[in-house]
Image (cartoon, rainbow, N blue to C red):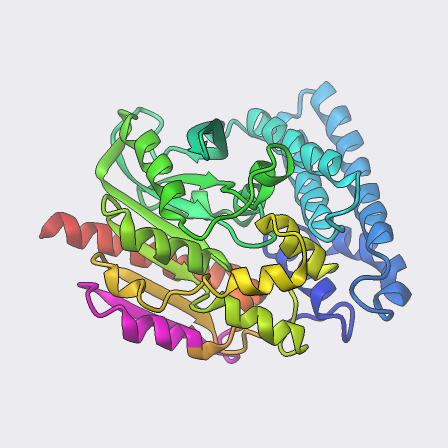
């Protein structure tokens, strides 16, 4: 993995995620260059300065976009707003859950991205999926990207993120454009514990993720441009737990992809207490308590024992793909094999491990994200075609 900040895995992860999600090396370098000494002091020190430096580049891009739009150069303006959104989004991800300013930064990343859609004439639209939790009517915020602008019904993939990513990062990565190029629409969702659902609506994560899946499928089934019999689900990072859990019990799903095998996430938390493996974000324990709505670490660790797929993946009865990096420093490779071995009732199960020689060997392939994305998109397209043929 490209290590801009030697020895600081968490900050390096943010850099490579940005570069694999539409960021440009010169702009990232200008943001990061003043931070090198701070980075040497650990991942938690200097995150406010990290936000300020990356915000500065985003500010400059937004000013340039305004001038470009005034000159009638809509595409140039849209491209600059898109990258500004990427930088704000990735820097906000690094902030403490206790930072009172992070929600405003997050909202800015959303606003910049939506403005870029308009200027770039993107068919992507911001939508709200109706959802009820504990009797409260709310929504799961999402972006929907149709494969066809003429309204022709198409297969669709629901895309879920993980512990610290957002639907804006999915757009930045280009998941939707890769799927659309293969005739597949995309619904990119912030479920509980993530993105807009957590920050602006206070929805925590939940173990029984089939509730999220049911809401997403209900919404998609009501659309005339979606094939209701061809709705799949992919989740990356902690989504590698969320998605298989949902596919085990929401039987309307046609296929499932675990983009990073989070087979026993509760056990991973115990390893992190013992400082085994790498954390994905600074201020880690504050972050996980926020995501799951737990009061303290002891309560959370006990609660997290239920976040595992033993006895669950056996219930998956649709095609199931697991992709994992051989050098994933967060989630043990053995969990990918365990998910594969236990998914005995899937009619088509596949395990793809990415090696250091080819790249995409780190967590969810963030060191070479397009390589994993292409493989996943091809597998999804091929599997939908096989289902049609059968």
In the image, residue 9 lies in the stretch drawn in magenta: no
Quarter of the image for residue 25 reads bottom right
Is residue 336 shown left or right of residue 74?
Answer: left
| Residue 123 percent location from the top left of the image | 45, 29
The residue closer to the viewer here, 128 or 188, is: 128
Give the residue at x 46% y 69%.
264
Magenta extent: 335-360
From this view, report whether residue 332 is shown above or below residue 83.
Answer: below
The residue closer to the viewer here, 198 or 87, is: 198
From this view, report whether residue 308 is shown above or below residue 48.
Answer: below
From this view, report whether residue 260 is shown above or below residue 288.
Answer: below
| Residue 168 percent location from the top left of the image | 58, 41
Give the residue at x 42% y 65%.
308
From this view, report whether residue 274 is shown above or below residue 312.
Answer: below
| Residue 222 percent location from the top left of the image | 28, 26
Is residue 27 shown left or right of residue 387?
Answer: right
In the image, residue 339 lies in the stretch drawn in magenta: yes
| Residue 223 percent location from the top left of the image | 30, 26
Give the residue at x 22% y 56%.
318
Give the residue at x 40% y 41%.
212
The residue closer to the viewer here, 357 or 153, is: 153
Residue at the far left: name it: 390
């Amino acid at each position: 993995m490209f290590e801009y900040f030697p020895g600081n895995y968490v900050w390096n992860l943010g850099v490579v995620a940005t570069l694999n999600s539409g960021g440009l090396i010169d702009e990232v370098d200008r943001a990061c260059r003043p931070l090198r000494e701070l980075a040497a002091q650990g991942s938690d020190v200097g995150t406010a300065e990290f936000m300020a430096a990356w915000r500065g580049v985003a500010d400059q891009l937004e000013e340039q976009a305004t001038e470009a739009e005034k000159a009638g150069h809509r595409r140039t303006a849209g491209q600059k707003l898109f990258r500004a959104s990427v930088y704000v989004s990735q820097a906000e991800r690094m902030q403490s859950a206790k930072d009172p300013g992070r929600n405003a930064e997050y909202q800015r990343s959303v606003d910049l991205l939506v403005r870029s859609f308009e200027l770039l004439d993107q068919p992507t639209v911001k939508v709200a999926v109706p959802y009820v939790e504990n009797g409260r009517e709310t929504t799961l915020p999402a972006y929907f990207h149709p494969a066809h602008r003429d309204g022709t019904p198409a297969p669709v993939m629901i895309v879920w993120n993980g512990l610290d990513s957002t639907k804006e990062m999915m757009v930045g990565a280009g998941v939707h454009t890769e799927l659309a190029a293969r005739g597949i629409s995309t619904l990119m969702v912030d479920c509980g514990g993530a993105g807009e659902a957590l920050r602006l609506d206070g929805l925590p994560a939940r173990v029984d993720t089939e509730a999220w899946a049911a809401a997403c499928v209900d919404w998609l089934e009501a659309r005339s441009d979606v094939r209701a019999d061809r709705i799949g689900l992919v989740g990356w990072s902690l989504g590698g737990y969320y998605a298989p859990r949902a596919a085990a019990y929401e039987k309307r799903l046609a296929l499932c992809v675990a983009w990073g095998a989070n087979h026993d996430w509760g056990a991973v938390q115990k390893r992190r207490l013992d400082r085994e493996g790498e954390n994905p974000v600074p201020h880690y324990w504050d972050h996980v308590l926020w995501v799951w709505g737990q009061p303290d670490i002891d309560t959370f660790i006990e609660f997290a024992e239920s976040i595992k797929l033993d006895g669950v993946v056996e219930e998956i009865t649709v095609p199931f793909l697991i992709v994992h990096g051989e050098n994933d420093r967060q989630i043990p490779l053995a969990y990918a094999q365990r998910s594969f071995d236990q998914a005995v009732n899937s009619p088509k199960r596949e395990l793809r491990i990415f090696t250091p020689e080819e790249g995409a060997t780190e967590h969810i392939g963030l060191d070479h994200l397009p390589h994993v994305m292409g493989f996943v998109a091809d597998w999804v397209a091929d599997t939908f075609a096989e289902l049609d043929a059968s």
